[in-house]
Image (cartoon, rainbow, N blue to C red):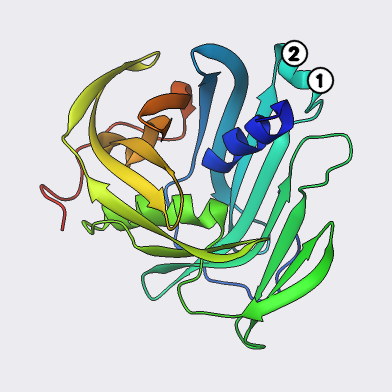
Amino acid sequence: MTIQSKLTLIAVIIAGLPAATVFPAEPTEITQYTAEYEVQYKGRRVARAQFAVATDTAGQFAFNSSTEARGIWRLAAPKAAIERSLFGVETGRIVPTSFRYEDGSRKGEDNYSLEFDARGGEVRITSAVGKTSIDFEVGLLDRGSLQVALMYDLGSCKLPGPYRYVDDGGITEYRYERLDDLAVETEIGTIETVRFSQQREGSSRHTILWLAPELSYLPVRIEQIRNGEIETVFSIDALSGIESKSPNCSSLG
């Protein structure tokens, strides 16, 4: 695996085009925050990442992530890999309107953007190879809004997924399996978590998500596993915008 492909893989685990649809803000239901993570690949510190959710001036919400390589990894990705998802909330579900990904490389060969057009019945995809479109589906998510939907559903006492997800390669599906609950030591303290295994349809890799109920189910640790070996780890080390509180539900499901 090349350095560039490894950086792209890191960015996947973790900004926008103006949208035609404006959703009423529901700030009591969407957790707004800024979280920072140290990123390791096979035990080596390779990057820092930031996830953030905030309101957008157009009356929507925006999920932003930024993953900045360091050390020799910057040779392949001198700029930060960024994602920006604009979305609203409608009838209890996350509804994305646009998404943009920049891979952080000099040429940006893996950059792409999405526009969700529910009225026109399509999702328009723009990438280095050109423009295409696929049929719109109710419930379809992008990389950023998928993470928001995960926290949103858990906060509503629902088990996550399966989620239908679109990127420049088309539509796939993420499924989730509940694992044992564990406490994890982090730079912001010892945190009780619920854990889920997340796997994309057809992938040989799976991801373990350590989600903190008292922090609105924010991921405080993310482990990507391939062939039984932990490859990439995101570990939280700074957080603002979320105050610790008792979760709304005593059980999930």
Query: Residue visible at 20% across and 43% down?
Result: 247
**Image point (24%, 57%), residue name:** 159
Q: Label 1, secondary structure: give it.
A: helix
Left or right: 101 as drawn, with respect to 200: right
Placement of the C terminus among the 4 image quadrants: bottom left
Instruction: Please state which of residues 182 and 225 is positioned toward the viewer in this rendering.
Output: 225
Residue 217 placement: quadrant: top left
With respect to residue 74, does 101 lie above or below?
below
Residue that numbered label 2 is attached to: 72
- Name the residue that disc number 1 marks: 75
Q: Is residue 222 above or below residue 69?
A: below
Residue 36 is situated, as x and y percent measured from the top left of the image, at 53, 26
Circle 1: residue type = Leu
Which residue, as the protein is rendered here, is positioned at the far right?
107
| 36, 239: nearer the viewer | 36
Is the Cβ of the residue at disc 2 closer than 8 Å to that at disc 1? yes
Q: Amino acid at mark 2?
A: Ile
Which residue lies at the image location 58% right of the left edge and 33% below the top edge? Answer: 10
Which quadrant would the N terminus be assigned to in this image? top right
Alpha-carbon span between mark 2 and mark 1: 6 Å
Q: Secondary structure at mark 2?
A: helix
Q: x, y percentage for residue 18?
A: 75, 65
